[in-house]
Amino acid sequence: MKELVGKTLNKLPTPIGKQREVLYLPAEGHTVVLGTAGSGKTTLAILRSAYLADPSTAHNGRTLLVTLNKALVTYLNHLRPSEFSNVVVENYHKFARGYLNSRGEMGKNDILSEPDQRDDLIKQAVRNVKSKYRPNQFFVRPLKMFSEEISWILSHGICNKDDYRNVERIGRASSRIHNILRYTMFEILEEYLSLRLKMGKSYDWDDLALHTNQEFQKDDSSRLYRHIVIDEGQDFSPEMLRSLAMAIPSNGSLTFFGDMAQL
């Protein structure tokens, strides 16, 4: 974002060198652009969005520039260069909420957004499942472990216990769950979801993308955006990326900008 400081508000910076090659990549299909910190990925994401939305081109169409960085969203919406007349800049969660609302699947208070409430439900879920088993050290693991594992399962779009048991896990050795215990962990997840639903909360921040992706798979209506550009894509969960890939038509494009050192 700092590359834009000092530029006139109604004109984007001019691409130079290899930036031009990236900017004019095909306007159809999926494209991944990786770079190091400070290489100008955000500037290119902005330029790419303006290029794809340019009404003077044959490939033009409504374009979404999506990020998890709320500060960037605020900055660009304040800036609103003239080249952004057909570009929408949004945080991913706003995009997902808006889409689910348009499909009649999102109420005003449907998201469990308070971390303390979420923790309390997970604690209760662990207790409820624990009561069905003989004493086991698994159930006295830290709350953080259960919370992070639930987040991981949901953010990877895993919807049944067999997929969870068979999925390969990399890293997190300190809290790795043995395959034999994964059915129990999934039971805790299901209990958490049941308790949450009883509270009137259909979603939390971790499974919002899962439900968005599932809804897109049922949705055969015209897509709102022809092109989507993802900034800082390494921060997006796998299910977020899948849902965004589902949000474009067959003649559209998805451009992913990410930090190669963080993937």
Image (cartoon, rainbow, N blue to C red):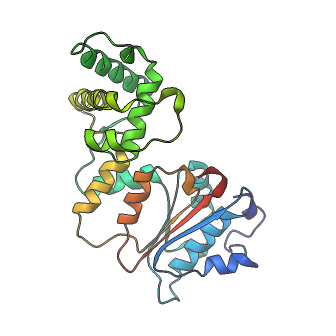
- Dividing the picture into quadrants, the one containing residue 185 is top left
Judge whether residue 230 can be spotted in this image: yes
Q: Is residue 193 above or below residue 243?
A: above
Q: Which sits in the foreground, 166 or 93?
A: 166
User: What residue lies at 25% left-to-right and 32% top-to-bottom?
Assistant: 190
Q: Is residue 3 above or below residue 91?
A: below
User: What residue lies at 41% left-to-right and 37% top-to-bottom?
Assistant: 151
Q: Which sits in the foreground, 169 or 254?
A: 169
Q: Which sits in the foreground, 84 or 18?
A: 18
User: What residue lies at 38% left-to-right and 27% top-to-bottom?
Assistant: 118
Q: Is residue 49 above or below residue 112?
A: below
Q: Residue furthest top?
A: 135
Q: Is residue 130 above or below residue 14?
A: above
Q: As drawn, is 4 to the left or to the right of 192?
A: right
Query: How many numbered marks, from 0 up?
Result: 0
Q: Position of residue 32 (x, y in %)?
A: 55, 68
Q: Position of residue 219 (x, y in %)?
A: 23, 64
Q: Residue furthest right?
A: 6
- Dividing the picture into quadrants, the one containing residue 119 is top left
- Dividing the picture into quadrants, the one containing residue 75 is bottom right
Judge whether residue 205 can be spotted in this image: no
Q: As drawn, is 204 to the left or to the right of 44?
A: left
Q: Position of residue 49 (x, y in %)?
A: 55, 72
Quadrant containing the N terminus is bottom right
User: What residue lies at 28% left-to-right and 15% top-to-bottom?
Assistant: 130
Q: Position of residue 205 (x, y in %)?
A: 40, 40
